[in-house]
Image (tube, rainbow, N blue to C red):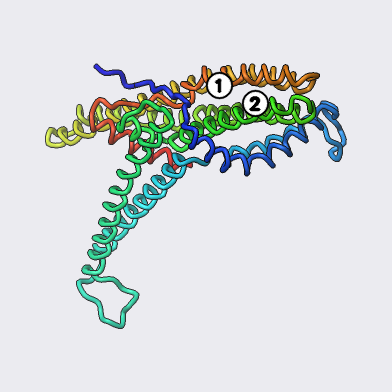
Amino acid sequence: MKSLFCAIVLVCCFATSVLASSLEDVWGEVHPLLSEAVAELDLRGNVPDSSWNPLKEDKKSVDGKINGLLDECIEVLGISGMSETKEAIRKLQDDSAKCRERVAELKIERLAAPKKVKKWEVWKKDVGSIDEEVKDLEIRQEENEKQVESLIDKLLVEMKDIGMKVDREQVETLVYSVTGDDDVRLVSVFNNVKLITTELQRLTAEANENIEMAKRYYGMHTLLLRILINLYENYENKIDDVYLVRIKEIITKQEELIQRTIAKIENEPAKYRGIYKTNLAAQGLTVRTAKMYAQYLGKNRERIADAKSGIFHEYEVALNTYETVQGAHNLITLMRDANAMLDRISELQTPDLIVFQNSEMKTEFRKLTTKLNELN
């Protein structure tokens, strides 16, 4: 039996033209935010660890300002062709969900609707007008699905363009996973951080005789590492505190329902047992898929935890060096080491993507994703 999980490897190898274009777009927006954050980082070394006076800065208040600026950086760094494509897919999926809800409402209205209404009763709907609206909504859903399929193909190309070894079925898993937006955002931020780190290394080397400029660029590099740590922690917390909790609730309710259904099969009249057995099979599929979903999310969380661990040590060294640096040469050497570290953990940036055992499980996976999203 094929494994449910197929690892994919991210190799960050951009063409020169793509690097130049991306750097120009991203750096212009991120640079002022990083500059302000570096100024706060400088201030951090001159304030007490804590203060009873709410009007006086301490390390906690400065860290709050830094994190706020870094959150703004994340929004910019998360922008990419992939993230825009994924956002377009999400909007189409949301529109289709609204169409389905409206169709369900109209079908209920149709039960009590008259066959015809008088022309002046413009507030009323007859069976014909309801049927026409349902048809329009169903056509809209079909068009949305076609556009989603096209955008999935586009997302596949965009992922391959940045070196990701992934096939279409794996991209579909990403698109229909509850963490899909977070996964695409993580990859986009990581790639942009690598891009800017390479440029900062060059600028630091050029500023060799200007220690203040070199220190400033290195401070930006340090904060970029902190951005990744913050991003990874948010990802971990979301999986631990939101999605896995909700999946556990779904499994518990389904297992309770299974026990009640088994009792019905044993005690109800024979003519109903076939229905209960069909329901039991569906309930069992939901439990199996939910457990697979939890395993899928848990494994991706472990990969992100490993990536965060590698970057955290690098960040601690970078921060300590930034606060005590005396020579630009040491900064350049450390930044080169950091680039090598980012290369080593590149494969940890993207999630394992599921290859489903059967179409029924794929359908149930999507249903569970919808259910998890509805609870947001």
Numbered badge on residue 124: none
Position of residue 74 measured from the top left corner of the image (x, y, whole percent): 59, 37
Q: Residues within 10 Å of mark 2 (few under 14, many from 20)?
A: many
Position of residue 133 measured from the top left corner of the image (x, y, whole percent): 27, 64
Image height of 4 relative to 245, above or below: above
Q: Give the residue drawn at x 67%, y 17%.
A: 333
Secondary element under disc 1, as helix, strand or loop, is: helix
Q: Quadrant of residue 60?
A: top right
Q: Quadrant of residue 307?
A: top right
Position of residue 157 measured from the top left corner of the image (x, y, whole percent): 36, 36
Nearer to the camera, 111 or 7: 7
Nearer to the camera, 110 or 292: 292
Q: Residues within 10 Å of mark 1 (few under 14, many from 20)?
A: many
Mark 1 or mark 2, which is nearer the start of the sequence? Answer: 2
Secondary element under disc 2, as helix, strand or loop, is: helix
The kind of residue on which mark 1 rests is Leu
Q: Which residue is mark 2?
A: 201
Q: Give the residue drawn at x 60%, y 32%.
A: 196
Left/right of residue 219 with respect to residue 326 in the rendered view: left
Q: Which residue is mark 1?
A: 342
Hey, which residue is sitting farthest left in the picture?
Answer: 271
The kind of residue on which mark 2 rests is Gln
Image height of 26 relative to 277, above or below: below
Left/right of residue 41 with respect to residue 29 in the rendered view: right
Position of residue 151 measured from the top left corner of the image (x, y, whole percent): 35, 44
Mark nearer the viewer, 2 or 1: 2
Left/right of residue 353 with respect to residue 108 in the rendered view: right
Image height of 154 relative to 333, above or below: below
Q: Say which quadrant the N terminus sits in.
A: top left
Q: Give the residue drawn at x 23%, y 28%.
A: 358
Nearer to the camera, 317 or 231: 317
